[in-house]
Image (tube, rainbow, N blue to C red):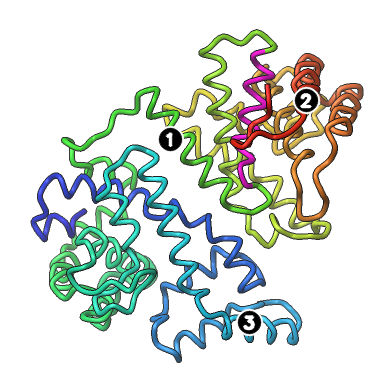
């Protein structure tokens, strides 16, 4: 946003840019599984971040990156096969950028934001000389907002790692290739603004971002907008793995139907639906090497998985409009007898909504395919729910309502939610 100020962008463009910047990485979860399939090894988050630390358009740097991150920790032969597939994978690079940019743009439009905002996200990885991705746009054919984001994201990463002066040297080296040279000139002024860097290091980033928002472009978070936000981030969450596709929306479908049968009013139904849509947001921090693993998880991998509800709480609770249901959303793996996770809460600490979410999550998890098994038959799911209820782990009223919902499920409708 400071670069936009230095370049004299009008208020309307600054507003479009602000929301594009906030949502620029919303599509990142969509290519996480593909990154893991290509590179294997450990955490795809590290693999994805590291790509920005090299000039991936120069073959020597690309080769060093591939050798360092492909199949780390795997046997030599498996690593070699991955490297061969990566080298032969024509179009893989473009596909990774395309998925990320297109999904991010779709999410922006789904939130009711402008086409200019979506276009900025769609073109943020294009390069001034036409060597970027995914469309190979060149020069002024790249929207100015996309050019700003493209340079700002590289500037930020190198500034965080090595300081602003070193980051500016990277921008200079990539001027006329990656970046619009006039924007690099503007970045020189920003690089020299010590008060800016001091504020960035010493203040709450949320406060700094709030101050950077063009007030005339502020979007009110009314009820309709809250539903759009919850839906949009359910897309982000479920895109993380092919095995969780549409999971959050299906859990929301089960939860609202169970709650309806238990007498929740409309306010309560809206609240539990939003909690269900966002209950797994903490899974964005779980590597796909764990989420998509076809075999049993190790003890260390289980510890990572069991922390995701805590991450859900950490993400949702600071947001005033979501804090009301943050605890319920983070309790979706808790059990009445204290055997659940992440906190081992017992019956007295679990609200009716939290108990419903636990049952709804189990319903969809058992019905859906997983990397280690096929989805279960509905009657088997009912049997398991009743067994868990019988041993005191699940709420009897919630299980009874879920049994009624499941007894009416003959086939999944096209929108992925259970039939009434």
Labels 2 and 1 touching (C-beta < 8 A): no
Task: Name the image quarter holding residue 414.
Answer: top right
> Which residue is labeled 2 in the image?
406
Helix, strand or loop: magenta stretch:
helix
Q: Are marks 3 and 2 in contact (CB under 8 Å)?
A: no
Query: Which residue is labeled 3 in the image?
Result: 85
Please tell me which residue is depicted at 33% across the width and 37% down the height of the picture. 112
Mark 3 vs mark 1, foreground winner is: 3
User: Residues under labels 2 and 1: Cα distance?
Assistant: 28 Å
Few, some or many residues within 10 Å of mark 3 (<14, 14–19, 20+)? some
Q: Secondary structure at mark 2?
A: helix
Residue 249, magenta (yes or no)? yes
Residue 174 appears anywhere in the view: yes
Vertical position of residue 399 compared to residue 317: above or below: above
Q: Which residues are magenta?
A: 245-260
Residue 67 visible? The answer is no
Q: Are marks 3 and 1 in contact (CB under 8 Å)?
A: no
Determine the secondary structure under disc 1. Answer: helix
282 vs 386, left or right, is left
Q: Residues within 10 Å of mark 1 (few under 14, many from 20)?
A: many
In the image, is residue 327 part of the stretch drawn in magenta?
Answer: no
Is residue 299 left or right of 62 when viewed as pictured? right
What is the C-alpha distance between the residues marked 3 and 1? 38 Å
Query: Residue 357: where, in percent of width, then height?
Result: 67, 27
The residue that mark 1 highlights is 229
Q: CA distance from mark 3 to mark 2?
A: 44 Å
| Marks 3 and 1, the one that precedes in the sequence | 3
Q: Is residue 27 above or below residue 388?
A: below
Question: Horizontal and vertical percent for residue 355?
Answer: 71, 22
Count of numbered marks: 3
At numbered mark 3, what does the secondary structure look like: helix, strand or loop? helix
Is 17 on the left or on the right of 62, as rendered? left
């Amino acid at each position: 946003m400071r670069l936009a100020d230095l370049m004299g962008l009008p208020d309307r463009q600054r507003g479009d840019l602000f929301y594009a910047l906030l949502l620029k990485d919303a599509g990142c979860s969509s290519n996480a599984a593909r990154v893991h399939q290509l590179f294997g090894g450990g955490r795809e988050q590290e693999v994805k971040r590291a790509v920005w630390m090299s000039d991936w358009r120069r073959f020597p740097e690309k080769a060093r990156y591939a050798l360092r991150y492909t199949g780390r920790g795997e046997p030599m032969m498996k690593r070699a096969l991955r490297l061969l597939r990566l080298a032969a994978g024509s179009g893989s690079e473009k596909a990774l950028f395309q998925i990320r940019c297109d999904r991010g743009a779709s999410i922006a439009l789904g939130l009711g934001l402008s086409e200019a905002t979506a276009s900025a996200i769609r073109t943020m990885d294009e390069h001034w000389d036409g060597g970027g991705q995914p469309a190979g746009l060149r020069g002024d054919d790249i929207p100015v907002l996309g050019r700003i984001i493209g340079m700002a994201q590289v500037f930020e990463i190198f500034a965080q790692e090595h300081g602003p002066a070193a980051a500016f040297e990277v921008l200079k080296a990539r001027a006329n290739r990656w970046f619009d040279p006039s924007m690099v000139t503007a970045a020189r002024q920003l690089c020299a603004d010590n008060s800016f860097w001091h504020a960035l290091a010493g203040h709450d980033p949320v406060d700094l971002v709030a101050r950077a928002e063009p007030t005339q472009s502020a979007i009110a978070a009314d009820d309709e907008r809250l539903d759009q936000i919850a839906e949009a981030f359910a897309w982000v969450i479920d895109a993380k793995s092919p095995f969780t596709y549409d999971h959050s929306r299906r859990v929301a479908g089960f939860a609202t139907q169970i709650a309806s049968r238990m007498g929740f009013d409309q306010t309560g139904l809206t609240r539990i639906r939003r909690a269900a849509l966002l209950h797994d947001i903490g899974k964005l921090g779980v590597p796909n090497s764990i989420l998509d693993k076809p075999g049993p998880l190790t003890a260390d991998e289980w510890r990572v998985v069991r922390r995701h509800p805590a991450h859900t709480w950490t993400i949702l609770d600071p947001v005033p409009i979501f804090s009301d249901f943050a605890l319920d959303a983070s309790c979706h793996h808790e059990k009445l007898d204290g055997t659940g996770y992440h906190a081992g809460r017992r019956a007295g600490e679990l609200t009716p909504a939290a108990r419903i979410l636990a049952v709804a999550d189990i319903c969809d998890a058992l019905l859906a395919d997983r990397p280690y098994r096929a989805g279960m038959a509905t009657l088997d799911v009912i049997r398991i729910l009743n067994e868990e209820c019988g041993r005191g782990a699940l709420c009897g009223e919630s299980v009874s309502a879920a049994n009624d919902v499941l007894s009416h499920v003959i086939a999944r409708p096209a929108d992925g939610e259970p039939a009434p």
